[in-house]
Amino acid sequence: MARYKLSGGCACGNIHYDFDGELAMAVHCHCRDCQRSSGSGSAAIFAANRNDIQLTGKTSSYQYTGDSGEAVVRHFCPNCGSPLFSDVKTLPDLMFMRIASLDDPSQIRPSMHIYCDSSQVWDRPNDPLPKFGKMPS
């Protein structure tokens, strides 16, 4: 796998992170929670080992129940509201980072679409990437 050395953060500069490691995955997520938190039809996300991410600044967060029945905590900047990452109880070693929060989002390209069963009619995936109704195994 490729190793990445990237940085990112929120729009106002209050929160910053550095990432140095390999990706667990990079996806377009079409679940309703990503739609609501992004204000669009999907969110582009990369997952990485939390030990490979150094975060500075204090986020605000809220918790909801994912389709696994377990907690998902979404983190965002308390100043500008930029969505940054999620913690998923069923995958505690990973952080699910918003690709758009990277200083150079073009460095990571999602390899699939997930939760396509929830995609909106005005934002159906129309590219050659694999598409999954829910989270693939």
Image (cartoon, helix red, strand yellow):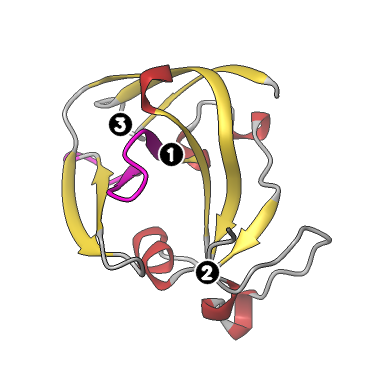
Q: Quadrant of residue 28?
A: bottom right
State which tag comes first along the sequence, 1 or 3: 3
Q: Which residue is mark 2?
A: 41
Tell me the CA gap for discs 3 and 2. 24 Å
Q: Which residue is mark 1?
A: 97
Residue drawn at x 70%, y 21% as measured from the top left: 2
Circle 1: residue type: Met
| Left or right: 61 as drawn, with respect to 117 | left
Which stretch appears magenta? 78-96
> Residue 98 in the image: x percent, y percent?
45, 42
Mark toward the viewer: 1 or 3:
1
Callout 1: SS: strand
State which tag comes first along the sequence, 3 or 2: 3
Q: Which residue is mark 3?
A: 12
Tell me the CA gap for discs 2 and 1. 17 Å
* Along the line of sight, the residue nearer the viewer: 66 or 38: 66
> Residue 106 in the image: x percent, y percent?
66, 33
- Could you tell me if the residues under marks 3 and 2 are in contact, i.e. CB atoms within 8 Å? no
Q: Residues within 10 Å of mark 1 (few under 14, many from 20)?
A: many
Q: Is residue 71 above or below residue 123?
A: above
| Left or right: 127 as drawn, with respect to 48 | right
> Residue 65 in the image: x percent, y percent?
24, 66
* 104 in magenta: no
Circle 2: residue type: Gly
Quadrant in which the N terminus appears:
top right
> Residue 36 in the image: x percent, y percent?
36, 68
